[in-house]
Amino acid sequence: MKNTMTINGYQAVIEFDPDAGLFRGEFIGLNDGADFYAKSVKDLQKEGGGSLHIFMKMCKEKGISPIRHYSGTFQVRLSEKEHARAVKMAAARGISLNQLIRDSLAGMET
């Protein structure tokens, strides 16, 4: 699992970029990419705050929502064996594949 950081109420995924020798953060759940680089956690918070501020300002100027909206549907690609296993798991619980996924996600921490 990747590391995450909350900056001004928005979550960012943090990873180390060995080529740049810096930590890279990228906000998730936003309408477009808003990333930032820094050498330390303290600097990540500062740079992330600045990046987020600029992103929000640009969205306001363009009249677009900064938050990505999701349709509620997605396609999952599985191997034949994985698909069969998922069908069996759902059937054994007396639920649909859709409900199996929903139940799985309900138990996950965000």
Image (tube, rainbow, N blue to C red):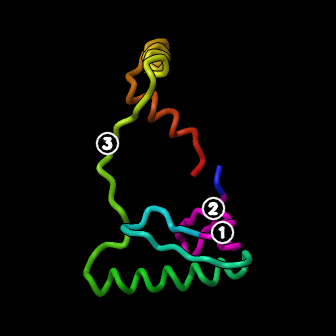
Most frequent secondary structure within the magenta stretch: strand
Asked if the magenta segment contains residue 66, the reply would be no
Asked if the magenta segment contains residue 15, the reply would be yes
The residue wearing badge 1 is 19
Q: Nearer the viewer, mark 1 or mark 2?
A: 1
* Residue shown at the point (64%, 54%) measured from the top left: 2
Write down the region rendered in magenta: 3-24
SS label for mark 3: loop
First in residue order: circle 1 vs circle 2: 2
Q: Which mark is residue 11?
A: none
The correct choice, above or below, for 68 with respect to 38 in the image is: above
First in residue order: circle 2 vs circle 3: 2
Q: Nearer the viewer, mark 1 or mark 3?
A: 1
- On the image, the x and y values in percent for residue 104 come to 52, 34
| Distance Cα–Cα, label 1 vs label 3 | 36 Å
Q: Nearer the viewer, residue 92 or 62?
A: 62
Q: Is residue 87 left or right of residue 59?
A: right
SS label for mark 1: loop
Q: Which mark is residue 73?
A: 3
The correct choice, above or below, for 89 with respect to 60 in the image is: above
